[in-house]
Image: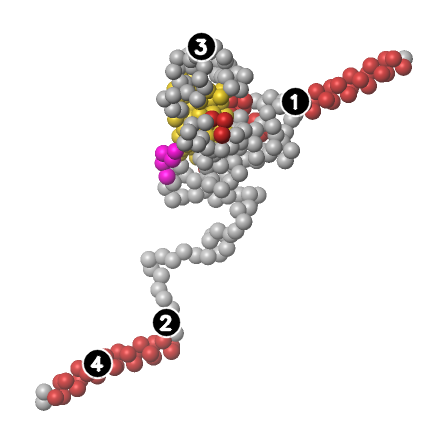
């Protein structure tokens, strides 16, 4: 009986550890949904002609990743396209890394994945809970690249941002393409494709920006029909100026008589 109880307690403890590992999250919790992305903004990372990895492959991986502000300013829409993949070493993975690629093209200088919530790479990302994954682990959240043929996919990620200054901002970071063993094959920086059209979706009150916008602060914008109020004193001064301006004309007229 005592042996049976020990087994039961051990099983409960093991299942608890397993559940905890399957529900891994960052030290700061799950990633937050990003809002307020500027409408019409797109950035693109295009892989260079030459690979960073010096091993035996038939030229560099070709392709790009385009990121566009999501509908209503929520999250980012991604369009991914890769071809000329190595004949072995997959499934291939790709991420957004914290730092940009330097001028010398050294992909190791891009540092680690974008990970604002300090989640780390282990255990592996659970695609059923993308909010618990590293923000930059795009292939972990939305699929590794199996096979060697051309690869193309589109998806929406709510946890990355195109709002400059935000911790989840990606445009000043880099795209890195890896073998399955995490060796870096190639990398690229982002460039801006389209600018905003001047309209910014309002941010929910649950995402404070550190200041009040004009609308929320009760500040109205001037219109073309706005008039400047004139006080009685100002009106009197204006009439005096008008009188002084007319006086020389009267004197000149009397001189002609």
Region of the chain picked out in magenta, as a range: 191-195
Helix, strand or loop at disc 4?
helix
Q: Residue 22 carries which label?
A: 1
In this picture, residue 2 sits left or right of residue 164:
right
If you read the primary sequence from the N terminus, does the residue marked by circle 3 or circle 1 appear first?
Answer: 1
Alpha carbon distance from label 3 to label 1? 32 Å
Q: Do the residues labelled 2 and 1 touch (CB within 8 Å)?
A: no
Pointers 3 and 4 in contact (CB under 8 A)? no
The quarter of the displayed image where residue 133 is located: top right
Image height check: is 79 above or below 83?
Answer: below
Q: Earlier in the sequence, mark 1 or mark 4?
A: 1
Q: Give how far apart the Cα atoms at labels 1 and 4 are.
A: 89 Å
Seen from this angle, which residue lies furthest top? Answer: 87
Is 116 on the left-hand or right-hand side of 6? left
Q: Give the Cα distance between marks 2 and 1.
A: 70 Å
Residue linked to disc 2:
230
Does residue 191 show up?
A: yes
Q: How crowded is mark 3: few (under 14 residues within 10 Å), some or many (20 or more)?
A: few
Screen quadrant of the N terminus: top right
Q: In this view, does 94 lie to the left or right of 3?
A: left
Residue under pointer 3: 87
Assess whether mark 4 and mark 1 are in contact (beta carbons under 8 angstroms).
Answer: no
Residue shown at 78% from the left, 19% from the top = 12
The x and y percentages for residue 221 are 41, 56
Q: Give the residue at the far right of this rendering.
A: 1
**Please, what is the dominant secondary structure of the magenta stretch?**
strand
Asked if residue 77 can be seen in this view, the reply is no
Q: What crowding class fits label 2: few (fewer than 14 Cα within 10 Å), some (14-19), or many (20 or more)?
A: few
Looking at marks 2 and 4 on the same chain, the residue that comes earlier in the sequence is marked by 2
Residue highlighted by disc 4? 246
- Viewport quadrant of the C terminus: bottom left
């Amino acid at each position: 009986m005592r042996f049976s109880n020990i087994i039961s307690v051990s099983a409960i403890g093991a299942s608890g550890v397993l559940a905890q590992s399957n529900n891994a999250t960052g030290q700061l919790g799950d990633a937050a949904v990003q809002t307020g992305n500027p409408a019409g903004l797109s950035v693109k990372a295009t892989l260079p002609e030459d690979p960073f990895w010096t091993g035996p492959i038939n030229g560099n991986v070709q392709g790009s990743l385009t990121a566009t502000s999501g509908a209503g300013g929520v999250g980012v829409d991604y369009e991914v396209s890769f071809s000329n993949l190595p004949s072995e070493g997959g499934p291939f993975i790709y991420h957004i890394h914290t730092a940009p690629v330097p001028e010398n093209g050294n992909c190791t200088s891009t540092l680690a994945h974008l990970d604002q919530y300090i989640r780390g790479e282990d255990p592996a990302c659970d695609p059923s809970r993308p909010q618990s994954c590293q923000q930059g682990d795009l292939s972990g959240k939305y699929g590794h690249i199996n096979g060697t043929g051309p690869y193309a996919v589109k998806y929406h990620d709510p946890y990355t941002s195109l709002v400059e200054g935000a911790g989840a901002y990606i445009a000043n970071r880099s795209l890195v393409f890896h073998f399955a063993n995490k060796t870096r094959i190639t990398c690229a920086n982002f460039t801006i494709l389209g600018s905003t059209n001047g309209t910014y979706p309002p941010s929910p009150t649950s995402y404070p920006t550190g200041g009040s916008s004009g609308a929320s602060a009760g500040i109205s914008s001037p219109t073309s029909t706005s008039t400047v109020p004139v006080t009685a004193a100002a009106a009197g001064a204006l009439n005096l100026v008008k009188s002084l301006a007319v006086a020389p004309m009267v004197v000149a007229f009397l001189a002609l008589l």
